[in-house]
């Protein structure tokens, strides 16, 4: 299904990967609750109540609260990785690809800020197996951005002394948008994306 669900702050987040509809409603409710209260302060009763369901109904679709967080985190990281892979694989110079990667990544973190806050900042709440899976995805995210920076250095487009450190700085800058962005603020997601793309190109000494 492609039905969109509203999340906190007026966002629209399509969770078409999640079926049936009841499971999707619970997942959207969990995103809202985790973003608002934090994973540990949220109960399964809180989640079920937000979804207009009984606590018993939640366990039909998710065995534990952690399973919900894992599902949210997996979908979010898959989306983030897809955004960066698309930008990294496009035709063009390293400068163009890095600008595209950053602007797209930032737009997602601003436009999907409620989901992004949960995806990026609740990792430690996952158990060892689930956490290892998400960490592996994060390494792939890192590799996509690092690859573009390395290409730019090799082509003489970028002036970077520490590729790994610069990659970490770029990703940290993009991800933090989810922490502060507000629909009531002075910027749209597109404007923040363009601004951050320019900042990152300056960071790498783009020529």
Image (cartoon, grey):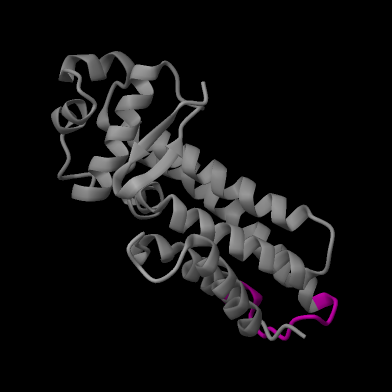
Looking at the image, can residue 179 be seen?
A: yes
Give yes or no for residue 117 being in the magenta stretch. no
Residue 14 vertical placement versus 83 (above, below): above
**Picture residue at 71% right of the left edge, 50% below the top:** 86
Q: Position of residue 85 (x, y in %)?
A: 69, 51
Q: Is residue 14 left or right of residue 101?
A: left
Residue 198 vertical placement versus 32 (above, below): below
**Picture residue at 27% right of the left edge, 26% below the top:** 64
Q: Position of residue 98 (x, y in %)?
A: 69, 67
Give the image quarter of residue 50. Answer: top left
Looking at the image, can residue 125 be seen?
A: no
Camera-side residue of 97 and 64:
97
Q: Is residue 85 left or right of residue 181?
A: right
Q: Position of residue 41 (x, y in %)?
A: 15, 45
Camera-side residue of 43 and 18:
18
Q: Position of residue 104 (x, y in %)?
A: 60, 58
Give the image quarter of residue 148. Answer: bottom right
Please state the extent of the stretch shown in magenta in the rendering. Answer: 154-165
Give yes or no for residue 158 being in the magenta stretch. yes
* Quadrant of the image containing the C terminus: bottom right
Label tally: 0
The kind of secondary structure the magenta stretch mainly shows is: loop
């Amino acid at each position: 299904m492609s039905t969109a669900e509203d999340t906190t702050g007026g966002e629209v987040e399509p969770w078409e990967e999640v079926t049936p509809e009841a499971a999707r409603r619970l997942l959207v409710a969990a995103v809202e609750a985790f973003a608002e209260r934090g994973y540990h302060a949220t109960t399964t009763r809180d989640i079920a109540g937000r979804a207009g369901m009984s606590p018993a109904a939640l366990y039909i679709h998710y065995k534990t609260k952690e399973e919900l967080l894992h599902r949210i985190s997996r979908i979010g990281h898959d989306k983030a990785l897809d955004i960066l892979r698309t930008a990294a694989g496009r035709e063009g110079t390293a400068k163009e690809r890095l600008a595209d990667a950053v602007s797209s990544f930032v737009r997602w973190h601003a436009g999907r800020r409620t989901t992004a806050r949960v995806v990026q900042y609740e990792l430690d709440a996952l158990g060892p197996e689930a956490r290892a899976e998400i960490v592996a995805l994060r390494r792939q995210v890192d590799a996509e951005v690092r690859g573009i920076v390395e290409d730019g250095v090799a082509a003489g487009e970028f002036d970077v002394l520490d590729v790994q450190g610069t990659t970490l700085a770029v990703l940290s800058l993009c991800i933090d948008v989810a922490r502060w962005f507000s629909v009531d603020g002075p910027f749209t997601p597109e404007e923040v994306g363009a601004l951050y793309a320019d900042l990152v190109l300056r960071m790498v000494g783009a020529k």
